[in-house]
């Protein structure tokens, strides 16, 4: 372990601003620089948080030899290119989801990470949410018995979001539901089969050529008797926002609440029991534990749509930062590392391909699997 603080730069200051105070207070980090194309917003955020190093040009930021790691929070189509540029510039990378938008881009990031020896972590919120940590604790204590089946869904109305979201294939942004079904058993997807259902507005279909209102994918886990099912919708489907995760065990099962702010349910045979999900700030350094309950986007006058619709992302942000920084400090792989991130991301990409082919079984590429 090293006592040296890591100089971190955050790229993208919409949702990304949420992470600034967490890095500022984490004992292993120095919140060194920020980057935003809009200079007015760049200076507004820089002044608010007292950050001196400011860049409006990402390429210029990467030339700074004092930056150890970048945390990317930009639109999804920029993730792969910006991750690759950072790795080639000698920087460790934390990147918001998804890792990339094509299988080829995922392959390039894995190859670049392994060639350089640098660290890559996809910052998937659900697998560090208090709900997931609650189920994980039950499972690891042996309370659930043998895992028998996993299910997750992410249903969200994306009308009004930036233009690149319009008509996006549902499974192309599926990490919030794929992540937990692979993370709980520490499994890897071996192959997928997915069906599309329904139809979105004709004007939405044009951009990506994807007609489906809902896509539902079955995942076969490698070297396991487990399978999982994930469901995703983005447009023309009447449903309150929901990121959900269900886990069925031989002794105890967990089902996410159907309605936001209601209690989830534990089953132990015939009698279900409502359960209050506790907070998991106690797993974090004292300096950042409070960020599981409150962040930049909590106040009425200072909100970001991703944070609002994601119900604060389950208090996951400080857990994500802590995992990334401690992995670097301890010279170990974070979860998920580059291959695991590729496996999670490629499930969604290939699931949509399967849906367009009528449910054809498609195997995950070898570069997404760990031996």
Image (cartoon, grey):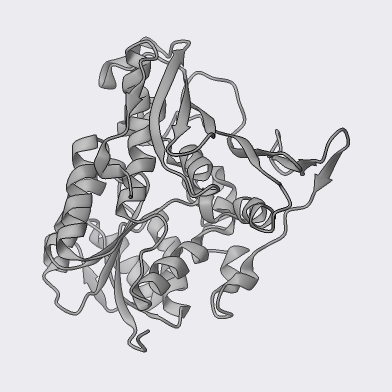
Residue 107 visible from this viewpoint: yes
Q: Is residue 173 left or right of residue 310?
A: left
Percent x, y of residue 102: 24, 35
Q: Is residue 187 left or right of residue 144?
A: left
- Decide: is 80 above or below 57: above
Q: Quadrant of the N terminus?
A: bottom left
Q: How many marks?
A: 0
Residue drawn at point x = 62 percent, y = 31 percent: 240
Of the pair 206 and 127, the residue shown nearer to us: 127
- Decide: is 311 above or below 47: above
Residue drawn at point x = 60 percent, y = 51 percent: 132
Residue at the bottom extreme? 3
Percent x, y of residue 138: 69, 54
The picture quadrant where one finds residue 121 is bottom left
Percent x, y of residue 50: 37, 79
Residue at the right extreme? 271
The picture quadrant where one finds residue 148 is top right
Residue 168 visible from this viewpoint: no
- Decide: is 361 above or below 49: above
Of the pair 294 and 292, the residue shown nearer to us: 292
Residue drawn at point x = 33 percent, y = 24 percent: 362
Percent x, y of residue 303: 51, 53
């Amino acid at each position: 372990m090293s006592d040296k603080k890591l100089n971190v730069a955050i790229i993208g200051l919409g949702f990304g601003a949420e992470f600034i105070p967490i890095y500022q207070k984490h004992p292993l980090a120095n919140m060194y620089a920020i980057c935003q194309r809009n200079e007015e917003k760049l200076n507004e955020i820089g002044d608010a948080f007292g950050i001196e190093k400011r860049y409006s040009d990402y390429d210029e930021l990467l030339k700074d030899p004092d930056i150890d790691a970048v945390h990317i929070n930009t639109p999804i189509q920029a993730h792969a290119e910006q991750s690759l540029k950072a790795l080639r510039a000698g920087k460790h990378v934390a990147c918001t989801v998804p890792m990339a938008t094509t299988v080829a881009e995922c392959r390039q990031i894995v190859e670049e990470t392994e060639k350089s020896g640098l660290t890559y972590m996809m910052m998937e919120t659900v697998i560090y949410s208090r709900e997931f940590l609650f189920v994980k604790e039950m499972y690891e204590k042996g309370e659930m018995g043998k895992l028998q089946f996993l299910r997750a869904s992410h249903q969200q109305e994306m009308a009004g979001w930036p233009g690149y979201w319009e008509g996006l294939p549902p499974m192309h942004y599926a990490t919030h539901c794929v992540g937990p079904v692979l993370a709980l058993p520490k499994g890897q997807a071996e192959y997928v089969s997915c069906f599309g259902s329904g139809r979105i507005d004709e004007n939405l279909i044009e951009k990506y050529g994807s007609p489906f209102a809902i896509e539902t994918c079955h995942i076969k886990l490698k070297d396991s008797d487990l399978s999982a099912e994930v469901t995703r919708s983005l447009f023309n489907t009447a449903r309150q926002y929901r990121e959900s995760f269900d886990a069925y065990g031989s002794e105890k099962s967990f089902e996410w609440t159907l309605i936001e702010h209601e209690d989830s349910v534990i089953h132990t045979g015939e009698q279900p029991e409502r359960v209050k999900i506790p907070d998991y700030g106690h797993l974090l350094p004292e300096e950042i534990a409070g960020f599981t309950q409150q962040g930049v986007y909590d106040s009425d006058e200072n909100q970001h749509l991703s944070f609002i619709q994601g119900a604060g992302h389950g208090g996951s942000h400080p857990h994500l930062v802590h995992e990334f920084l401690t992995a670097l400090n301890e010279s170990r792989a974070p979860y998920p590392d580059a291959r695991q991130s590729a496996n999670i991301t490629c499930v969604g990409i290939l699931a949509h391909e399967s849906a367009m082919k009528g449910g054809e079984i498609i195997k995950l590429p070898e570069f997404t699997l760990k031996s």
